[in-house]
């Protein structure tokens, strides 16, 4: 399946960067046709009204959209928020989020999990009511042990290989 | 500029956010402002266990004035993400004694009609 992976973290050497690598490994294992869009590396301007033609084309030809980002202030980073706000109506059938949270699941539930709602609900205004969504998330990064982080990376690879 | 803004925020007792929401959330520019200005040392700090602790204790009130393209019930159905970020995520860093007031103008309405509500939100 034609897949667009959007990465929104300034540093590829980070934990989220590692998650991106494992996600790509998983998707390739499954045989998907993957294109990666690194918003920070491209210097994407999040305050535009509509996406650049190249991004538009990529969204239109993709059936699967994978978003890999850190959760900041309980939502997507501004660069990705802006990208999603400018996204055109398209026939993307499934959206997968791979994300990390600094604080625990409990805190995020209190905050209303706005990043998750953005993906599972708000995005349906662009991709239709029957869009499928998957949530691959890591919580409490601030206090996490190396083993738990490694386990998450394995989970990312395995879950994306099953798509 | 970022440092100046951080200084203003640290001294503020009332934070008022005025924005036009898009895709049920904050405009990217305002979200980016939060990410750049509300950093460790300004909005929160890490304790010795590596947990986040609030650092904006001087803020007594958060007021939001937002316009929405969608109707009230649709915003509630999807979840008012911008309001959640400001009234819950940010409030965790100002303390539970901070009050919040919200004025929403739904369905592409005219904010002028909400003047009375805005005045009440700011004074109460």
Image (cartoon, grey):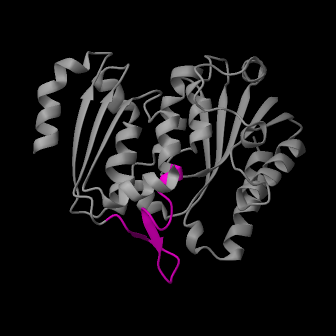
Position of residue B32 relative to residue A88, above or below, is: below
Q: Is residue B124 left or right of residue B26?
A: left
Q: Is residue B124 left or right of residue B28?
A: left
| Observer able to see residue A126 | yes
Image coordinates for residue A130, horizontal then vertical, percent: 56, 24
Residue A86, by quadrant, is: top right
Q: What is the quadrant of the N terminus of chain A in the image?
A: top right
Q: Is residue B24 left or right of residue A9?
A: left
Image coordinates for residue A119, horizontal then vertical, percent: 55, 37
Residue B110, by quadrant, is: top left
Write down the region rendered in magenta: B35-56
| Front-most of residues A124 and B72 | B72
| Front-most of residues A103 and A45 | A45
Position of residue B75 relative to residue A73, above or below, is: above
Position of residue A5 relative to residue B49, above or below, is: above
At 23% across and 38% down in the image, what residue appears? B102
At 47% across and 68% down in the image, what residue appears? B41
| Observer able to see residue A128 | no
Q: What is the quadrant of the C terminus of chain A in the image?
A: top right
Instruction: Examine the structure image and report whether residue A52 is included in the region drawn in magenta.
Output: no
At 34% across and 41% down in the image, what residue appears? B83
| Front-most of residues A92 and A159 | A92
Image coordinates for residue A3, horizontal then vertical, percent: 79, 32
Position of residue B54 relative to residue A121, above or below, is: below
Residue B73, by quadrant, is: top left
Image coordinates for residue B89, horizontal then vertical, percent: 39, 54
For the image, the number of numbered tags is 0
């Amino acid at each position: 399946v034609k897949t667009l992976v959007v990465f929104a973290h300034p540093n590829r050497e980070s934990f989220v960067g590692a998650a991106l690598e494992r996600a790509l490994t998983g998707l390739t294992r499954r045989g998907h046709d993957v294109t990666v869009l690194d918003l920070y590396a491209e210097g994407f301007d999040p305050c535009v009204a509509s996406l650049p033609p190249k991004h538009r084309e990529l969204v239109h030809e993709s059936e699967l959209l994978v978003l890999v980002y850190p959760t900041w202030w309980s939502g997507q980073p501004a660069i990705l928020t802006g990208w999603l706000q400018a996204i055109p109506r398209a026939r993307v059938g499934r959206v997968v989020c791979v994300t990390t949270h600094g604080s625990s699941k409990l805190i995020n539930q209190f905050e209303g999990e706005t990043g998750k709602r953005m993906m599972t609900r708000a995005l349906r205004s662009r991709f239709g009511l029957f869009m499928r969504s998957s949530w691959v998330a890591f919580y409490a990064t601030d206090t996490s042990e190396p083993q738990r982080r490694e386990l998450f990376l394995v989970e990312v690879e395995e879950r994306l290989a099953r798509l | 500029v970022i440092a100046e803004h951080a200084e203003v925020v640290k001294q503020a007792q009332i934070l008022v956010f005025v924005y036009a929401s898009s895709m049920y959330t904050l405009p990217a520019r305002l979200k980016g402002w939060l990410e750049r200005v509300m950093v460790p040392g300004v909005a929160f700090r890490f304790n010795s266990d590596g947990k986040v602790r609030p650092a904006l204790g001087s803020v007594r009130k958060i007021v939001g004035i937002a316009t929405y393209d969608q109707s009230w019930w649709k915003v509630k159905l999807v979840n008012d993400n911008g309001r959640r970020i400001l009234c819950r995520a940010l409030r965790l860093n100002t303390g539970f004694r901070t009050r919040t007031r919200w004025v929403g103008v739904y369905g592409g309405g005219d904010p002028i009609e909400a003047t009375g509500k805005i005045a009440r939100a700011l004074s109460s």
